[in-house]
Amino acid sequence: MAIDVQEATPTAAEYCDLRVVCGLSPMTIEAAEARLPRTLFGVALRDDGRLVGMGRLVGDGIHVQVVDIVVRPDYQRRGLPRTIMEKIMSYVESSIPECAVVSLFADVDWLYPKFGFGSPEKSRGMLFKRRPQREAARFSTCLISVFSI
Ligand SMILES: CC(C)(COP(=O)(O)OP(=O)(O)OC[C@H]1O[C@@H](n2cnc3c(N)ncnc32)[C@H](O)[C@@H]1OP(=O)(O)O)[C@@H](O)C(=O)NCCC(=O)NCCS
């Protein structure tokens, strides 16, 4: 298996599909089409053209966030998150000012410490929920997070 590692953002359709397949909250195709082009830096892993994993860096370059670290279930446990994160961290080191705040929400706590991430001492990440929990899965089109750093 030779995985093609691209510095690119997937198409909106690919992105929406991968999130759902991997158990993340659904995004609408309209929202993805409008907002994905604002990605600061994207990584797409492809096997024979098919999207099998991805990751993105979003933000304005002063506050940036690692998001959408995802690997398709049938490609998991092969170390692909490291490939994605190494590309992202290489971009951070080369293109993001040292004073910038680089954050993420970790659904799994074992993935990110090796890349230099840790829990902030004073801050606590928070998510703004726009609708009641049971409706969020159907209607959620964006995640708004707050970090006080
Ligand atoms: C989270 C996710 C990206 C991990 O992908 P994966 O292919 O299962 O990850 P891997 O098995 O290759 O493990 C990645 C690394 O973590 C290590 N690891 C795996 N499970 C671990 C555990 N329970 N404890 C500690 N380390 C672990 C692996 O050894 C590997 O280390 P390496 O890069 O140094 O070799 C994938 O499960 C996924 O897409 N999940 C759904 C989407 C999601 O939740 N994304 C958000 C993540 S915040």
Image: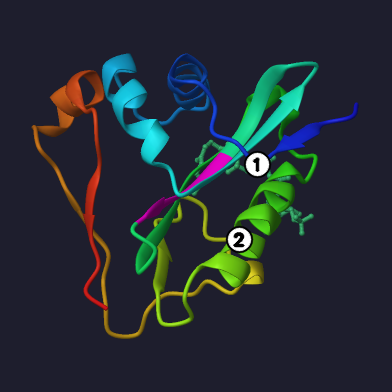
Q: Which residues are magenta?
A: 55-59
Residue 43 in sight here: yes
Question: Residue visible at 27% across and 24% down?
Answer: 31
Question: Residue visible at 33% across and 59% down?
Answer: 60
Q: CA distance from mark 2 to mark 1?
A: 10 Å
In this rendering, the answer to whether 42 lies above or below 136 is below
Q: Is residue 107 magenta?
A: no
- In the rendering, at what x and y percent does residue 6 appear? 70, 36
Quarter of the picture holding the N terminus: top right
- In the rendering, at what x and y percent does residue 86 appear? 70, 58
Query: Exactly how many numbered labels are in the figure?
Result: 2
Question: Residue visible at 35% across and 25% down?
Answer: 32
The disc label shown at residue 148, or none: none
Disc 2, SS: helix
Give the color scheme: rainbow, by chain, secondary structure or one colour: rainbow
- To which residue does mark 2 refer? 91
Question: Residue visible at 37% across and 40% down?
Answer: 38
Disc 1, SS: loop
> What's the magenta bit mostly, secondary-structure-wise?
strand
- 56 and 53: which is toward the camera: 56
Residue 64 appears left or right of 7: left
Q: Amino acid at mark 1?
A: Glu
- To which residue does mark 1 refer? 7
Circle 2/circle 1 CB separation < 8 Å = yes
